[in-house]
Image (tube, helix red, strand yellow):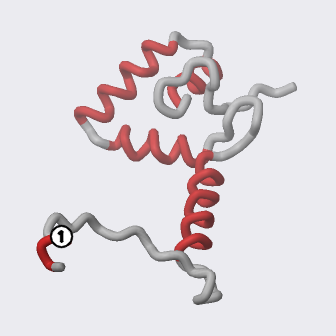
Amino acid sequence: MAKQLTRSRTHRVVAGVCGGIAEYFNLDVTLVRLVTAVTCLFWGAGILAYGLAWLLLPEEGTGDLGADKVFEKYTQYRNKYYAKDPVKQAEPPQAFDPYQDEQR
């Protein structure tokens, strides 16, 4: 069976991207994390690359993409607060108003 690049479940700190890259290329996970931290700090592109890898790489064992989870949470929020039937529509979360008691 061919090796597949996935997000690690065992070497996970944030999303398992660095652990998955280390396992795929047979590198030390600390070295991959250091390279990622340096690219994030000095060039900023590492943040974008890490985010894209989290969204596009499947999770080890389950095969779930990070984008699937984001889309699922968005769909749940949209269905809860913006339902098509106005009778069933819940109130969206209200912003904190420190002067609410004073206005009454």
The x, y position of residue 30, in whole percent, is 44, 13
Residue at 53% across / 76% down in the picture? 90
The x, y position of residue 85, in whole percent, is 64, 88
Name the image quarter holding the C terminus. Answer: bottom left
Instruction: Relative to 100, say whether 13 is above or below.
Output: above
Q: Nearer the viewer, residue 9 or 33?
A: 9
Q: How many marks?
A: 1
Q: Residue furthest top?
A: 28
Q: Nearer the viewer, residue 65 or 48?
A: 65
Corner quadrant of residue 59? top right
Residue at 53% across / 42% down in the picture? 53
Callout 1 secondary element: helix
Instruction: Relative to 22, say whether 85 is above or below.
Output: below
Give the left or right position of residue 100, taking residue 94 as reference. left
Instruction: Relative to 79, say whether 30 is above or below.
Output: above
- Crowd around label 1: few <14 · some 14–19 · many ≥20 (10 Å): few
The x, y position of residue 7, in whole percent, is 62, 31
Residue annotated with mark 1: 101
Residue at 14% across / 78% down in the picture? 103
Give the left or right position of residue 18, taking residue 101 as reference. right
Name the image quarter holding the N terminus. Answer: top right
Corner quadrant of residue 22? top right
Q: Nearer the viewer, residue 19 or 80?
A: 80
Corner quadrant of residue 94? bottom left
Q: Residue furthest bottom?
A: 86
The x, y position of residue 72, in whole percent, is 63, 58
Tell me which amino acid carries mark 1.
Asp
Q: Nearer the viewer, residue 91 or 37?
A: 91
